[in-house]
Amino acid sequence: MQRATSFQGGAYRWQVVAMLWLVCFFNYADRQAIYAVFPLLKSEFGFDSVQLGLIGSAFMWVYAGGAPFAGFIADRAKRVHLILGGCIFWSFVTVATAWCSQLWHFVTVRALEGLGETFYFPSSMSLVSDYHGPSTRGRAFAIHQSSVYFGTILGSWLGAVLAEWYGWRVGFWIFGSLGLVVAAVLYFFLREPQRGAADAAEMVATGHTLPHPPGKPLSIGDTLRLVLGKPAVVLLMLAFLGANFVATIFLTWTPTFLVEKFNYSLGAAGLNATLYIHLASAVSAPLAGMAADRLASKMAGGRMIVQAAGLLVGSIFVAMVGLCTTTPVLLAAMTAFGACKGCYDAGIFASLYDQIQPEARATAAGIMNTIGWGGGALGPLFVGLATTYGGAETDIANMSHAIALGGGVYLLCAALLAGAIACSQSANSSQQHPSPTD
């Protein structure tokens, strides 16, 4: 049985990020591949936009519904087993997707994929936070986040190219099989750290003591009070809901949008739907993580300021993607949106963990995923319904308007983060200058 190891600084903590980067790459490649072949599923099985939206949302609903339980378990069990065992499960489900031939088959495998993947982020983010303290956590999370973008790009592009050349099923066989191999190999190298080890090490190094030394796992009630009792945490989660609503729209519908509005081939749409957005995010996220680490060391809510700026500026480009009519403008808007998205994404869990003590972090991430992906799951269905039943003359005009509305959602999310920043600074001020007691 694997034991929890004491804090290990130096090279190994970055090797942990690299190993999890690989797992997360397949996490996103496996979930993204289905969206790239939507046009083929539409033509082969006769699925309409609402049915395709249901396939897209099935993953997200189960993923969101299982996340609090996954987080609660990850705060108590060995996270390495949850991460790699989950990878084995979802990789097998990815292979099984190739055997689908009816709507309920696709909905079922996507739901099972969500069940397998729901353990990953609560477990992995908690584990990374025990190898990286506040001084490097933003960078570590941002580097890990880049795997989301590369998995999304290659999952979409390779899924589409393989579908064009060999049929839509081949990509699922390949991605699923490779994920099984990765999980088996990493069982020999990935080690479980002690909870709170990185925070404790940094506190000791700077001559401080932990305000909340890690202890026994909290009860369900204490965990919920700790997580949901802080206004800044609630606002962070609501902002994540809105940002995910927009993100899932782009993940699900951009390949179809490019095929039907801009006459891309399936393979070109699979690549371009993700390349510009997610490559820009992959570049901006590590830079945003570095900037956030600096701001967080100087002021409460520093990471959230970087996130809010990304959402505020990004709202312009989300609307532009939906409303533009020429390819150069489209690609420029997608690139700029991706850069702004990376600024927000880099701090999703780092900002949350600034507010939460180590023994409740996986549960907090699970609850955040439930709220974010539960609401985000409505995005693909919203666009499917708007496309089918909207008031414009054509379906693609309806889809364009629905995508553009995401800009308004981004503005709302930026306002929520502004509230979270104010709450964080107020709480920090109260801790530094407590009221006199009688």
Image: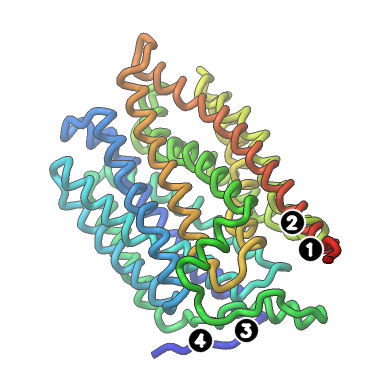
Toward which corner of the image does residue 255 lie, by quadrant? top left
Q: Residue at label 3?
A: 8
Which SS class for mark 1? helix
Q: Residue at label 1?
A: 431
**365 to the left or right of 130:** left
x, y percent for residue 161: 33, 44
Q: Can residue 291 be seen? A: no
Measured Cα–Cα span from mark 2 to mark 1: 6 Å
Q: Residue at label 4?
A: 4
**187 to the left or right of 431:** left
Q: Which mark is residue 264?
A: none
Residue at left offset 17%, top offset 40%? 103
Q: Earlier in the sequence, mark 4 or mark 2?
A: 4
Front position among marks 1 and 4 = 1
x, y percent for residue 76: 44, 76
Q: Residue at label 2?
A: 427
Which SS class for mark 2? helix
Quarter of the picture holding the C terminus: bottom right
Q: Earlier in the sequence, mark 1 or mark 3?
A: 3
State the residue in front, 89 or 435. Answer: 435
Front position among marks 4 and 2 = 2
State the residue in front, 133 or 163. Answer: 133
Q: Can residue 172 be seen? A: yes
Which SS class for mark 3? loop
Front position among marks 4 and 3 = 4
Local crowd at mark 4 within 10 Å, few (<14), some, or many (≥20)? some
- In this view, which residue lies farthest toward the left? 101
